[in-house]
Amino acid sequence: MAETLAHGPYAEFALLLIISAVAGAIAVRLRQPVLIAYIVVGILVGPAVFGIVKAHDQVALLAEIGVTVLLFVVGLKLDLHHIRHIGPVALATGLGQLGFTIVFGFVLIVLMGRSLMEALYVAVALTFSSTIIVVKLLSDKRELDSLHGRIAVGFLIVQDVAVVLAMMAMSALRGAGEAAIVEVAGSLVLRLIAAAALMYVLMRYVLPRLVGAMARSQELLLIFAIAWGTGLAALGEWAGFSKEAGAFMAGFSLASTRYREAMNARLTGIRDFMLLFFFVDLGAKLDFSTLGGEIWPAVVLSLFVLIGNPLIVMAIMGYMGYRKRTGFLAGLTVAQISEFSIVFVAMGITLGHVGVEALGLTTLVGLVTIMMSTYMILFSQPLYERLAPMLGVFERKRPFRELAMERQVRPAGQPDIIIFGLGRYGARLMQQLRGAGIEVLGVDFDPETIREMHRLRQPVRYGDGEDPNFLESLPLAHARWAITTFPQWESNRAFLSALKEAGFAGRVAGVVRDDLHAAALGAAGVQRVLDPFSDAADYAARSFAAEIAFEDVHRHEAAPTNLAETPVKEKKQ
């Protein structure tokens, strides 16, 4: 039947996408991440079950590009300003969890009879939590801007940096014996220094102008981002690191530009699509003859991740002055391993450090922990209510840090109003509001406008207001108003839909050019309609009317004096 359905790579790809879409729909229905469905699809279409897909080389190539885009997007989110403001709790929690999991995981795996190198790879793989899954789940629950959500994102950033450093270190040990480790370590340090110097020159002198030129076109900016990511990935592999490390550095080099949110929003869909092939390729390569012996080790390590990782996070956060509830909710976000874990072990196979058994074990742990932790995060509140009496050990008598945060009614620098579209009207409105002491953020997708507003020291972001992924990167949680100055109704319709999808709970105002536009915005639920021409005409009319009334009053006041003089003259005559 497979031969009948698939006639060549194109038909195989079409069938693969159809099966993946159906499996993904089932996973969403079960409230599971779709990557689990993709792994299952890879198993089903691979040689172990139906053997539908024969174009393994093409799928493998797309899988490599998917991993490249994934690491590029991770680097793109790692803004230097954010790194400086991660905060002590995120840094301490991230490093503490990494150290705990690596040390105890390594000992546990060695006790299972595994080699030291395999134990090291799997132990490191157990430390990484899935940023994609956690952020998606917290976003769906509207908890991304909560205290535990912000802390979780902070230590996920620490993990993302750690995974790239681990990839660099392990790829540098390619083919090195124990006697050559010191030499390889020295070579790695020199190459890191050279890479850092190159990145500094590019980020300081080359990329700002280059990206600014590319940003004149949204489509060109997207092509440039992919070209830059794949190009530096290839360069990273040539330099003795890995494609993954090169892709990460490519994204990191663009993270400080004002166009990173726009690139990230455009690449998110491509990343998800390309990762489909990575997980399908992974499922197709799983060797079921070796998986039988990995079941019990996978169960033990899954329990270690599901219980041990949250406990260490709660212990660190409790010591640092947070309540047990905050520590518990943040701890649940590390109760799974990541797609990075599988990528990391797969890289170890490519380098010849570990065998396929390590990949099978890591994949099984990933399937179990991702499935279980998803429900743990989704039903975190009922779970906490059941366990709260036993969690008092993770809370100080006076959680001083959280008490101090509660005195802050609203985070500093959060905008009250976000204005989308900074033309003459939007820019003037923004300047007047800020002059009145109101916190405002401006958004526009014209790089020249953004550059000019930066010159005027106005807080602005470059991006497309019609893109839900970009809107999710904005501080919408505390904004009271979103104002759109888009001139076309079609653009406003897409904007309102994206705003709703991003979970904006404030009010919306729209600038219109005609009555039809005003009626459409009103029907769409926009609370305030601003008509620059009518408002300007009304203001001008009121201004002239007030001026004429003022002049009439002064004439009226002056009139009696003249009238008084006139009768006197008439009387003399």
Image (cartoon, grey):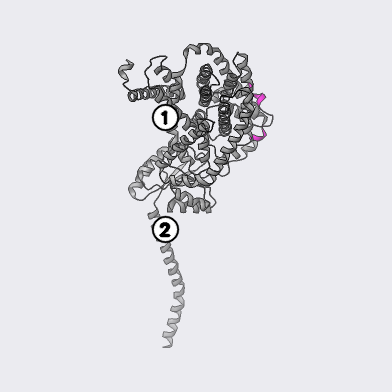
**Does residue 43 lie above or below 92 as drawn?**
above
- In the image, 287 versus 276, the foreground residue is 287
For the magenta stretch, what is the residue range?
390-402
- In the image, 282 versus 560, the foreground residue is 282
Is residue 395 rendered magenta in the image?
A: yes
- Which amino acid type corresponds to the residue marked 2 in the rendered image? Tyr
Residue 180 circle label: none
Give percent across and percent down for residue 102: 62, 23
- Which amino acid type corresponds to the residue marked 1 in the rendered image? Phe
Say which of marks 2 and 1 sits in front: 1
The quadrant of the rendering that contains the C terminus is bottom left
Decide if residue 530 is on the left or right side of residue 313.
Answer: left
Circle nearer the N terminus (2, 1): 1
Give the CA distance from mark 2 to mark 1.
52 Å
Quadrant in the rendering for residue 23:
top left
Is residue 352 rendered magenta in the image?
A: no
Kindly identify which residue carries mark 2. Answer: 539
Residue ranking furthest to the bottom = 573
Residue 273 circle label: 1
Residue ranking furthest to the right = 397
Residue ranking furthest to the left = 4
